[in-house]
Image (cartoon, rainbow, N blue to C red):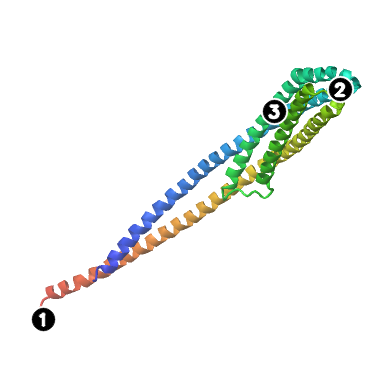
Amino acid sequence: MKNFPRILSVLGVVFSYVMLVLCVLGIVGVWVLRANVIQAADRVFQAADVALVQTVSRIEEAVKNGQDLQASLDALSTTIQAKGKTVQDNPVVLQAVDQALDGKLIPALVKLDGTWRDIYAGLTRINYALNTLSDSFLFRDRDGMVKQSAAFLTGATNSMDELDAGLRELQVTARAQKANVTERVVDRLTQPIDRLSRGVDTAQSMLTIIQTGLQSIQTRLSAAHDALLRTILLLTVIATLLLAWIAYTQYVTARVLWNRYKGFKSESGPAAAQPVEAAAAPSQD
């Protein structure tokens, strides 16, 4: 039992030095982890930034395609109004509609639809990147970028559906008027053309909104990236200081326990030697 305090002191020294080594390794690990986290975050931000740039470029292309489609619709509407004066002119009107559909409208709408689908795919990638970031406790979507990108997806879907519905209505109406020519052919054809024209206007307005919103998201995303890097650096420094403080306290504890162990050893040395010296002393008798 006399050696028990000495054993405890030795075990305490060993434990303190083990903790000291673990703290040093922890400091190294914190900075390695910081590099890995920054690398992973940069990949997500870079993917979002690339998608933003590509989507904005496709939006500019879609705006031009929409303008071309609107010009074709205006020309078709003017032709119908100019030539569709009497029932006898209806075949000429229907022929003009066929030529416009096959020559300009359908190719232009197919091209616009393809551009819209590229925009939708880009918005999907942006929304996925923002959702990935928002799942991290280091990123907070204070500006509502995730909701905004989701709203853009909905708007893009509605615009594509409106354009497709307008084209189908114009095709169906044209086929119906071929089978049953009436005096109202101009009115019947004007309605789907107007609907398709409104759809193009709506799509153009939506493109403008999305383009402005994406430019805003790009700016805010850059600021969020810088803020995230500062947050990671701050957490890394705090963890480093905390581990360094723990390592220092373990070093001090180890030194105290080691001095205590040497004190126990020096105390037991004279106590053990005293009986030996007493036995070796010569008798006075």
Which residue is depicted at the point 26% across and 68% down? 4
| Picture quarter with the N terminus | bottom left
What is the C-alpha distance between the residues marked 2 and 3? Answer: 25 Å
Is residue 208 positioned above or below 80 on the image? below
Is residue 52 positioned above or below 71 on the image? below
Is residue 177 positioned above or below 258 on the image? above
| Picture quarter with the C terminus | bottom left
Q: Tell me the number on the disc at residue 284.
A: 1
Quadrant for residue 178, please give it.
Answer: top right
- Please state if 69 lies on the left or on the right of 39 as rendered: right
Which residue is depicted at the point 80% across and 21% down? 97
Quadrant for residue 2, please give it.
Answer: bottom left
How many residues crowd around disc 1 within 10 Å: few (fewer than 14), some, or many (20 or more)? few
Residue at the outermost left position: 285
Q: How many labels does the image show?
A: 3
Observer-nearest of 125 and 235: 125
Q: Which amino acid does label 1 sit on?
A: Gln
What is the C-alpha distance between the residues marked 1 and 3? Answer: 122 Å
Q: Which amino acid does label 2 sit on?
A: Ile
Marked residue nearer the N-terminal end (1 or 3):
3
Marked residue nearer the N-terminal end (1 or 2):
2
Residue 60 in sight in this render: no
Residue 123 placement (x, y as % from top left): 65, 36
Residue bearing mark 3: 113
Q: What element carries label 1?
A: loop
How many residues crowd around disc 3 within 10 Å: few (fewer than 14), some, or many (20 or more)? many
Quadrant for residue 119, please give it.
Answer: top right
Q: Tell me the number on the disc at residue 80.
A: 2
Q: What element carries label 3?
A: helix
Residue 111 placement (x, y as % from top left): 70, 24
Observer-nearest of 234 and 177: 177
Which residue is depicted at the point 75% across and 34% down? 207
